[in-house]
Amino acid sequence: MVGRSSKTSPLMLVPLVSPTHYAGPGLGMQFRDGKPWKKVFGPVFIYLNSVTTKNGSHRSLWDDAKLQMLAQTESWPYQFPSSSYYPRADQRGLVTCQLLVHDVALATFKYANIGLAPPGPLGSWQNESKGYQFWTETDEKGFFEIKNVRPGNYYLYAWVPGYIGEYMHPSAIYVSPGKNITMGQLVHKPPRNGPTVWEIGVPDRTAAEFYVPEPNPRVTNRFRQYGLWDQYTVLYPDHDLIYTVGVSDYKTDWFFAHVNRNAGNNNYVPTTWTVTFDLDAVIIGNYTIQLALASATAAEVQIRINDRGGKHVFTTGLIGNDNAIARHGIHGLRARRNAMFLTQARGPDFFRGVMYDYIRLEIPPHF
């Protein structure tokens, strides 16, 4: 996080650990029982460029800065630091392998995210900030190289855009100074209980594919777009969102955040979104709803099937503390028309809500 110390000061503030704002307390470092800790931050490269109306444009500043960024990335790790805590390139290791995905069939996927992080349970890398992490992306065939890794023990984690779930290698990897590790082929098996009936969104850990409205014209800083969540009330002043599978388009008909509605006098009330869909017939067995969230802020999502006022069949309970929104009985399925109700049940704060990443209905497996 980088910010100016004041409107007039030329100084820049660079908090290297900031758990209290966007990230939340889950990323805060905790030190107990006199446990020693050290970590190298940097070197930090600051590049200043300039342009005049005679010899260029503001766009040229951006393009020039990107070229400088690429050059510095290729130069890392730098050779000039003399600290023994900062391994040089020949003192670091390399890890290579190929990642495949087996969902409906075995496949490769470009731009899968794969990295090394301190050992921990599945997903622990997302809240890990005390150690070092090294990440890269796969090529179009799933091959990757993780370069310049500090010596030590790591777990290998991966997640693939377009597939839910996450991969974790079952055993720890020790990276030795100056050594290369080749791991062969790894296979990620995303969670699935049956064939897909319908899906909303793309499982990529963001809500970017959904409808993001234009900001309030009264907002002076349009880049920040503060208050964007309140556009839900503008679009749905009297009723909540209804999405019809096969008719609606999530790019235009699914609001980017499931938030409370402003009922007037700054009174925000919980909202219920409806997903309607048709089934030609019902197969006896357990249907599965795969629900992936990209963000959650002091929210609770409840799911009901074909009974808006009945007992929910699932609830997340109170979840979420990421503040990203500020930042922006048994009821079974039936043949023909069905409705799934998604209720954000926590009020009255306007910040409370979730951003959906992906929703999928699966029919029972049948052979």
Image (spheres, rainbow, N blue to C red):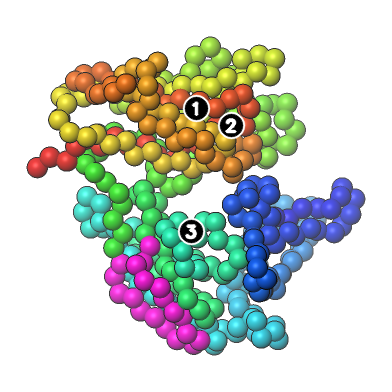
Q: Which disc is residue 27 wearing?
A: none
Q: Circle 3 sits on which residue?
A: 124
Tell me, yes or no, if residue 214 can be seen here.
no
Inspect the magenta stretch and tell me whether residue 303 lies in it: no
> What's the residue at 42%, 67% (across, down)?
156
- The quarter of the image holding the N terminus is bottom right
**Does residue 293 appear left or right of residue 2 in this picture?**
left
User: Relative to 81, does residue 7 appear above or below in the rendering?
Assistant: above
Q: Nearer the viewer, residue 120 or 116?
A: 120
| Mark 2–mark 1 CB contact (< 8 Å) | yes
Inspect the magenta stretch and tell me whether residue 172 lies in it: yes
Q: Circle 2 sits on which residue?
A: 352
> What's the residue at 57%, 35% (across, down)?
298
Say whether disc 2 or disc 1 marks the residue closer to the N-terminus. 1
Residue 66 on image: x %, y %: 63, 62
Q: Circle 1 sits on which residue?
A: 344
Residue 102 on image: x %, y %: 25, 56
Which residue appears farthest toward the top when viewing the image?
A: 238
Q: Residues within 10 Å of mark 2 (few under 14, many from 20)?
A: many
**Does residue 294 appear left or right of residue 222 in this picture?**
left
